[in-house]
Image: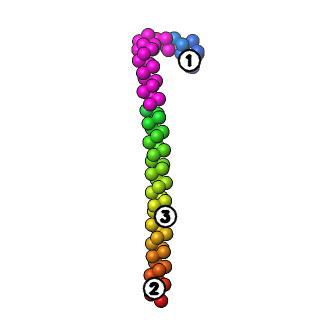
Amino acid sequence: MGSLSIWHWLIVLAIISLVFGTGKLRNLGSDLGFAVKGFKDGVKEAESLHDSMSTNALHEVVQSAKDAVHSVDEAR
């Protein structure tokens, strides 16, 4: 009694399609797909930016360590 059967869902779907029309529902679906695609692209871009920043930071640490070694060698 608490859960809805397949017939309840079909009736709800029929009412929604009558109220909004199939054109608006199709547009809503494509807009939702475009938003999800944009979100995924943004996440990929943020991850690649994070990876490149980590690589740049690592290069800076290595370079500063090399400079420190050279300055110690020159001081001797």
Image: magenta residue range: 12-34
Amino acid at the residue labelled 1: Leu
Q: Does label 1 or label 3 sit earlier along the sequence?
A: 1
Calculate the distance from the C-alpha at mark 1 to the C-alpha at mark 3: 56 Å
Residue 51: % across, % down: 49, 54
Amino acid at the residue labelled 3: Leu
Q: Which mark is residue 17?
A: none
Amino acid at the residue labelled 2: Glu
Residue 74 figure quarter: bottom left
In this view, the residue in front, 7 or 71, is: 71
Residue 32 figure quarter: top left
Q: Nearer the viewer, mark 2 or mark 3?
A: 2
Q: Nearer the viewer, mark 1 or mark 3?
A: 3
Calculate the distance from the C-alpha at mark 1 to the C-alpha at mark 2: 80 Å
Residue 68: % across, % down: 46, 78
Q: Is residue 37 above or below residue 71?
A: above
- Residue extending farthest to the bottom is 76
Q: Does label 2 or label 3 sit earlier along the sequence?
A: 3
Residue at the spot of label 1: 4
- Give SS at disc 1: loop
Magenta stretch holds residue 40: no
Q: Which mark is residue 74?
A: 2
- Number of other residues with Cα within 10 Å of mark 1, as a class: few under 14, some 14 to 19, many 20 or more: few
Main SS of residues in magenta: helix
Residue at the spot of label 3: 58
